[in-house]
Image: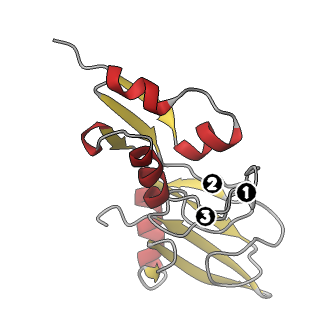
Amino acid sequence: GYHISYATAYTEENRFIAPVFDISALHPFLDAFTIMSYVYIGPTTGWTGSKQPLEGGPLYGSVYPSGGVSKYYNWKNTAQEWLAAGVPTSKIVMGVGFSGIEWVNLNNNTPGGSIAGGTGSNKNYDYLVTESEAHGGPLWYDFDKSDYYVYSIGGGKYTMGIYTGVAA
């Protein structure tokens, strides 16, 4: 009569940075893992991409220590790692964040690079959609599978907001 689930950080953090538990040993005793897969990167990492990329994203080691692992932080790789640990798909719940990051003072007007001076700020999904519409509608960043908008604030500087198209 009980449903037992475990809310956990995405696999990369648990396995490659600071192992916390053995997924393959724990999963037979749980009904589900709720993977908090909504903040792969934060506004202080310096990477202009989605907080929760479906694909793409920053390479391990470019944002957090990687222990020599060379993969991208994203939903696809996380799901593959949990499946490889023997967790059935019926026990994997991916957490979705309805938010994104807005950066100011970029050194270019495309996602996927580093920012020039300053950090980003977390914004809720409604804010990002409204700003996107105010600046010509969303653009598509195929590498991350994310929507974004960008506009010039003069002097070679830009404001950019990036958010995962949750309908994807």
- The way the protein has been coloured in the rendering is secondary structure
Residue 8 percent location from the top left of the image: 49, 32
Which residue is disc 1 drawn over?
63
- Residue type at mark 3: give it: Glu
Per the model, the C-alpha gap separating discs 3 and 2 is 13 Å
Residue visible at 28% across and 45% down in the picture: 89
Mark 1 or mark 2, which is nearer the start of the sequence? Answer: 2
Whether tag 2 and tag 1 are in contact, CB under 8 A, the answer is yes
The quadrant where residue 87 appears: top left
Specify which label sits upstream in the sequence, 3 or 2. Answer: 2
User: Which residue is the site of mark 2?
Assistant: 41
Left or right: 36 in relation to 63: left
Residue 102 has which mark? 3
User: In the image, which is nearer the foreground, mark 2 or mark 1?
Assistant: 1
Please name the residue shown 62% across and 83% down the image.
110
The amino acid marked with disc number 1 is Val
In front of the other: 1 or 21: 21
Say few, some or many: other residues with alpha carbon within 10 Å of mark 3 (under 14 / 14 to 19 / 20 or more).
many
